[in-house]
Amino acid sequence: MANQNVTFDVATGVPYAVNLNIYGGANFSDKFTITNPNGTAFRFDTGAGSTPSSPVEWSGSAAMSKSVAVGATLGVTTAFNVGFTSARDGVITLSLNPAATRNLKPGRYVYDVLVSSGNTTFNIINGDVLVKAGIATNP
């Protein structure tokens, strides 16, 4: 599992760019620790701008799409599983099981990660995904 440190600024709303590699037929899991510009954890156990005494529900979604040209995609190819590993510490995990990665065609994709609380949605992470085909088989 790879670990990524991401700084997200709510005021600008600009997603943080992180590129990923996925290997066909293998488990994929990547952990992201989200922090505010001042270094504190982006808390997924409170509302955006709320205090810790105001617990709210957050949800997340992430999807990738085959990229065919600059700025052009073919729609959602695969949706990632998104888990809030540690809401208090700002940790989320994206994952795909071997069956899902086996069905991906090798090549370049784009992806993004959205999180929402109430009526507030943030695109916190995006980037490119390079899918590599498996070569070896089980002995």
Image (cartoon, rainbow, N blue to C red):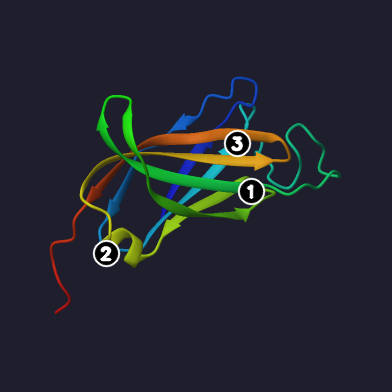
Q: Nearer the viewer, mark 3 or mark 2?
A: 2
Q: Which residue is mark 3?
A: 35
Q: Quadrant of residue 103?
A: bottom left
In the current view of this chain or complex, which residue is farthest to the top?
12
Residue drawn at x 55%, y 40% is: 114
In three-dimensional space, the C-alpha distance between marks 1 and 3, rounded to whole angstroms, equals: 17 Å
Q: Amino acid at mark 1?
A: Ser
Q: Amino acid at mark 3?
A: Thr
Other-residue count near label 2 (Cα within 10 Å), few / some / many at <14 / 14–19 / ≥20: some
In three-dimensional space, the C-alpha distance between marks 2 and 1, rounded to whole angstroms, equals: 27 Å
In the figure, 46 relative to 9: above or below?
Answer: below
Q: Position of residue 56 (x, y in %)?
A: 77, 47
In the figure, 134 relative to 66: above or below?
Answer: below
Q: Position of residue 86 (x, y in %)?
A: 63, 54
In three-dimensional space, the C-alpha distance between marks 3 and 2, rounded to whole angstroms, equals: 32 Å
Q: Nearer the viewer, mark 1 or mark 3?
A: 1
First along the sequence among labels 2 and 1: 2
Q: Say whether marks 3 and 2 touch (CB < 8 Å).
A: no
Residue drawn at x 69%, y 42% is: 43
Q: Which residue is mark 2?
A: 25
Q: Say whether marks 1 and 3 touch (CB < 8 Å).
A: no
Q: Quadrant of residue 4?
A: top left
Circle 2 sits in a helix, a strand or a loop, which is it?
loop
Q: Position of residue 80 (x, y in %)?
A: 45, 53
Q: Amino acid at mark 2?
A: Gly
First along the sequence among labels 3 and 2: 2
